[in-house]
Image (spheres, rainbow, N blue to C red):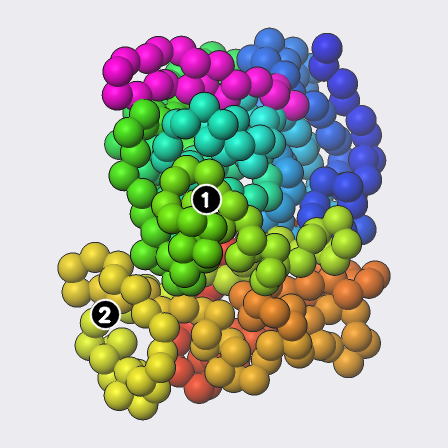
Amino acid sequence: MLQITENAQLKEFNSFGVEASARWLCTYNSPDDIRQLIEHFGHLTDKHILIIGGGCNLLFVNNFDGLVIHPTNDYINIVDETDDYCLVKAGAGTEWDSLVAWAVERNLGGLENLSLIPGTVGASPVQNIGAYGREAKDAIESVNVVSLADGSTATLSNAECRFGYRDSVFKHELKDKYLVDSVIYKLQKNPQFVTHYGSLSGEIEKLGGASLRTIRQAVINIRNSKLPDPKVTGNAGSFFKNPVVEQSVAERLKADYPEMVTYPAGPGLVKIAAGWMIDRCGLKGYTNAAKTAGVHTQQALVLVNLGGATGNEIIEVAHHVQNAVAEKFGIRIEPEAIVI
């Protein structure tokens, strides 16, 4: 049943835990809810709309003068199966790591490297979430969406989603026009493991060698050792994207900083570890003057709410980090988190 709350508080809907409010908040469980919303408000595309799943990639610097939609459709179903793979459908409101655990328990590969990423399934195609050499796009077969204009439904293929690095069509042409209702993943019964990224291979060896379970556990161990629990310390995970630069730029920087951490990013392109650059600027553990916000002591990519921080205090820390990296390396790092 559709529920609409006016002047809703959003502190529990963002993992930074900052105070903010929305003019309206509604929970979503099916396309019928969107059709009822349209009957209630008229054209939703005329409204300022924000879709929040786990709120794990958001920073509120202002109250939201519009309509927040929060999907709660939580389910996982096998919709097709062959000797080689399963097509698995998950509702947008499903907790992401619950889906990863479900897949690994059934010996279905493709999501294990993405273990313990906070948030919900609905965000996975929007953000094209990724970690340890894998991205959501590698497993997504299709995405089922609902039109905010008329409540009609449609299915987008992987190609139609136009996935990029932490990017998709849902951040561009389809932004505020469609809501992700569910995602279908193609999970492999005989998966090819990806274990070469960062410290992952060493952690897997400690656990006895590569398998779906050891890869998942290795990722969990690494993430727990580096990343703060948002239930204890407000954060949005990795706040900045790793910048992708031309190979010539990376080679020039490598000459000055041979230890610089890089990864291939396609023909003629190199991805540089933003966390390494922030750390090299001496900003790991940095705090603002009020000691309310800063950079995490264990992972420089993570900005933290140290207690009572406003969104503006956190974004001021972000700007300080961006300016320091730009001054030292000549590269402007961009937020992965969405600033509202």
Q: Is residue 129 above or below residue 25?
A: below
Outermost residue to the left: 267
What residue is drawn where x is 77% and y is 65%? 306
Q: Is residue 317 left or right of residue 141?
A: right
Q: Secondary structure of the magenta portion, mostly?
A: strand
Name the residue type under label 2: Glu
* Numbered circle sitting on residue 268: none
Residue 112: give x, y in percent of width and height: 44, 39
Residue that carries the numbered disc 1 in the rendered image: 214
Figure quadrant of residue 297: bottom right
Residue 48: give x, y in percent of width and height: 62, 36
The quarter of the image holding the N terminus is: top right
Q: Is residue 236 above or below residue 35?
A: below
Residue that carries the numbered disc 2 in the rendered image: 246
Q: Residues within 10 Å of mark 1 (few under 14, many from 20)?
A: some
Q: Is residue 87 left or right of residue 206?
A: left
Q: Is residue 227 visible?
A: yes
Outermost residue to the front: 208
What residue is drawn where x is 69% and y is 63%? 304
Asked if the stretch drawn in magenta spans residue 134, the answer is no
Residue 285: give x, y in percent of width and height: 66, 76
Name the residue type under label 1: Thr
Q: Secondary structure at mark 2?
A: strand
Asked if the stretch drawn in magenta spans residue 81, the answer is yes
The span from disc 2 to disc 1 (Cα, nearest Å) is: 35 Å
Residue 130: give x, y in percent of width and height: 42, 47
Query: Which segment did they paint magenta?
Result: 72-90
What residue is drawn where x is 45% and y is 44%? 214
